[in-house]
Image (cartoon, rainbow, N blue to C red):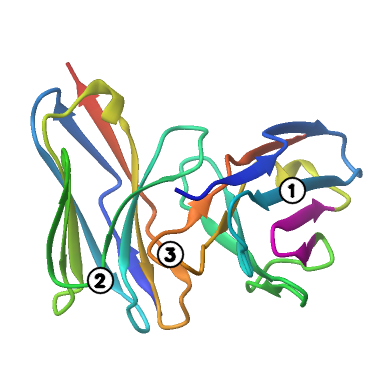
Amino acid sequence: GQNIDQPTEMTATEGAIVQINCTYQTSGFNGLFWYQQHAGEAPTFLSYNVLDGLEEKGRFSSFLSRSKGYSYLLLKELQMKDSASYLCAVMDSNYQLIWGAGTKLIIKP
Amino acid sequence: GAVVSQHPSRVICKSGTSVKIECRSLDFQATTMFWYRQFPKQSLMLMATSNEGSKATYEQGVEKDKFLINHASLTLSTLTVTSAHPEDSSFYICSARDPEVNTEAFFGQGTRLTVV
């Protein structure tokens, strides 16, 4: 079966750095996505990785290792507005998105 | 980026009635749109894949006669929840992938359905 694992909840301090991990087992791989979702809102796109390595975009970076079935989302200089759920999703061989359950990130002052 | 508009954002209906949710791609042609349901504190669950001009493909466990999907044009897909029950209360989200930019899926704003 297909499976995406990420921690249920994480807590971090404003101004700090947090890393949210995602491991996956899917039938085929056509890229890994990270989305941010605030409560009651639709997800918004953060990043896309299809090749191994680190993609940096401002305060957010995403890393992928296809051989390990592993990705992480790194958030730097945390702000209170970063409190949200972060969803990891993998596009499988049929170009369908397989979703993780999401990681709820709580930022404390 | 591309914009997907979903309407309505919130709807309250009585048990037994039907509700239609619209999903429009505003600046690109979406040959495929996706409908998701999300219960509180849970992940997005794919309900069906909507293909323009053909029947939708439903995920296992999703009743196609209850959740009617129509994708009549390249910019519009609709989801109709028929004979709604309180257990259908959920957050429904559509998404579309711009075939020219296959690196992300664009989501509608979501529809909060409450069946009373």
At label 2, which amino acid type do we have? Val
Residue holding disc 3: B101
Say which element carries label 2. loop
How many neighbours does mark 1 have within 10 angstroms: few (below 14), some (14-19), or many (20 or more)? many
Disc sitting over residue B115 in the figure = none
Image location (x, y in percent) of residue A32:
30, 65
Tag 2 subunit: A
Q: Provide the residue span drawn in magenta.
A: B68-81
Q: Quadrant of residue B112?
A: top right
Image location (x, y in percent) of residue B103:
37, 64
Q: Are marks 1 and 2 on the same chain?
A: no
Instruction: Characterize the magenta stretch by its predominant secondary structure.
Output: strand
Tag 1 subunit: B
Residue holding disc 2: A50
Residue drawn at x 47%, y 48% is B42
At label 1, which amino acid type do we have? Glu
* Image: A8 above or below A22: above
Image quarter hosting the N terminus of chain A: bottom left
Residue holding disc 1: B22
